[in-house]
Image (cartoon, coloured by chain):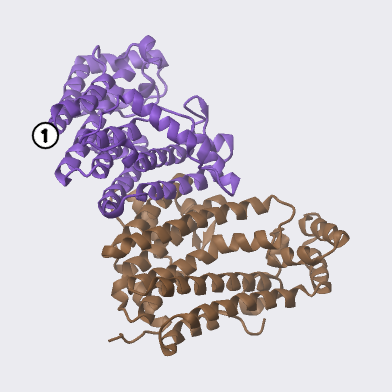
Chain colours: A purple, B brown
Amino acid sequence: MATTQHSIEELRNFFEEKIKLTEFKNQPVQLYEPIQYIMELGGKRVRPVCTLAAAELFGADTEIAINQAIAVEVFHNFTLVHDDIMDEAPLRRGHATVHKKWDENTGILSGDAMMILAYQYLSKNTDSKFHSLFSNFNKTAIEVCEGQQLDMDFEIKPTVSLDDYLGMIELKTAVLLGESLRIGAIMAGASENDANLMYDFGKNFGIAFQLQDDILDLFGDPEKFGKQVGGDVLACKKTYLFAKAYSISNETQRQELVDLYNSTSIDGSKKIEQVKTVFNALDIRNRAKADMNTFYVNAGIALNSISADDSRKKILKDFAESLMVREL
Amino acid sequence: MATTQHSIEELRNFFEEKIKLTEFKNQPVQLYEPIQYIMELGGKRVRPVCTLAAAELFGADTEIAINQAIAVEVFHNFTLVHDDIMDEAPLRRGHATVHKKWDENTGILSGDAMMILAYQYLSKNTDSKFHSLFSNFNKTAIEVCEGQQLDMDFEIKPTVSLDDYLGMIELKTAVLLGESLRIGAIMAGASENDANLMYDFGKNFGIAFQLQDDILDLFGDPEKFGKQVGGDVLACKKTYLFAKAYSISNETQRQELVDLYNSTSIDGSKKIEQVKTVFNALDIRNRAKADMNTFYVNAGIALNSISADDSRKKILKDFAESLMVREL
């Protein structure tokens, strides 16, 4: 008998409760206190909630996959701790980053310990499932590192192609979302094919979500999203908008675009306006939206192909839908 | 039929050949080039050689455990890359450290990738053995992080107890040596009891070896060991000699010792002489040697207890013996 499914909100609350009860703290305090700190900082918990929702979709109880949900969240937070050092970020979720609250060495070592803890949680109560969980997770983990490296590489390159950009965000953010879902499916005893479809759903949705993020940065309503418009442009960050514009422009336009985008001498709001003008001339907003929709549709196709009742897929489908901004 | 055993030298050469043939390099280059670099810097290869020797002791071919030997060496080198960042070390094995040759971010991220690669190699061709390999290795991996944290904690503490010091070196260096041996035993199909005895052998030997290192730093012949005498004293590093002296001295002596040891105002060679005088008055050199011997003997007892022909244990016994300095 398949169990009753819970709403995303219920799953998130369930996960938060579990995290509060999870004692990451241990000896030596200096190593474990930062782990407890970052794990309790909250966040949207998208990945562990996906793990739990995927397990429920296949009829399993959330308890079956709770350790694996913790694993993906600990792993995700390990990447945040190390990325924040690399990006010299002072804040995370409105609080001091680990390397700012303590120091860089603490950030490095506590991050290392978190990666090992992630493997530990991944292995809990898995029996014969561990081998496939492990080999999938391991592949994804190394891909996330590769994605972070590509992202850093792009910072010092004057331009980036569309394929390279898509490859980077796939590795840096999308594969872990896919993996979170696949892990839940595997823990629930789903077939390999269904588990991989779950992964495809998450990976495609993850790419769509990142493209939306890129579009919103320049074209979003600042009152609605509380973010400075054009932050990526000001930071000369090569986003999908840039890569798309670059890919469809001719030689002359390309040079203009690269020069303008990488310029740090043009006044902030003026630069944003000029970049917008170039993008508008190339209809980049609509083209990017169309591409985003393609990934979103592909995500839906993967979800639809899973051999389970459509009614059981509704929660994840609605969750994905709720994360997409319709008035884009 | 048990296979012929190879000498330590042969195993080391075999391992070096394998490392040369192992293609760590991949895309993105910036992530994998540092891994290839550090892995080819050489070193004594003690841990992977132990893995291979342990496998052969139980009659297995080295090929059986080669991936796991690579795993422990990659893991060990991951700890070196991150530790070198934390210690701001410019050199490793006579060459620039990864964070000096590239930069800190590269050191952090390539180190992360190495840890994941270590898990990947650990899992190769393991079948049903993977679960026990993994749970042992995972426990050891987190302990190594704890040991590194304790070592950093001790740097800013005025004193450290004997138990705390022993606990630190056990975690920071000894458990991984023990684990390298246990992994070889498991891969060769040894019983759980024999595998754990291998671990005990390595752990106890690792502690003995570290105590020897501490003694040599102050009492070793600089011409023989090519190291500056008293480097630990100059760096105010709380070694076993310090912890032992602290543990057996009275209140007044303790205060004198702590003040002297942590002093940075006394001229270098004068400080070394004064510390030596205090240690000599307490007969620390001989006491430390006696303690070192206890761990060494315990290592031998563990090795002797393994259910295999004594003749097959000779290579590891002789290897351990060769690493001990008799004229200490």
Residue B41, by quadrant, is bottom left
| Numbered disc 1: secondary structure | helix
User: Numbered disc 1: what chain?
Assistant: A
A316 vs B64: above or below: above
x and y percentages locating residue B56 in the rendered image: 36, 80
x and y percentages locating residue A81 in the rendered image: 46, 39
Query: In the image shown, does A190 or B312 lie closer to the viewer?
Result: A190
- Please state which amino acid type lies under the numbered disc 1: Ser
B95 vs B219: above or below: above
User: Which residue does the numbered mark 1 point to in the structure image?
Assistant: A305
Does residue B35 appear to the left or right of B61 in the view shown?
A: right
On the question of residue A211 being in view, the answer is yes
Q: Residue furthest right?
A: B252
Q: Residue at x 67, y 74 (%)?
A: B291
Q: Residue at x 33, y 13 (%)?
A: A273
Residue A188, by quadrant, is top left
On the question of residue A153 being in view, the answer is no
Q: Residue furthest bottom?
A: B311
Query: In the image shown, does B192 or B16 lie closer to the viewer?
Result: B192
Query: In the image shown, does A157 or B244 lie closer to the viewer?
Result: B244
B81 vs A172: above or below: below
Does residue B114 appear to the left or right of A294 in the view shown?
A: right
Q: Quadrant of the C terminus of chain B?
A: bottom right
Q: Residue at x 54, y 80 (%)?
A: B301
Q: How many marks?
A: 1
Q: Residue furthest front?
A: A1
Q: Quadrant of the N terminus of chain B?
A: bottom left
x and y percentages locating residue A65 in the rendered image: 32, 41
Query: In the image shown, does B118 or B137 lie closer to the viewer?
Result: B137
x and y percentages locating residue B178 in the rendered image: 48, 69
Structural crowding at the residue carrying mark 1, measured as other residues with C-alpha within 10 Å and reported as few (<14), some (14–19) or many (≥20): some
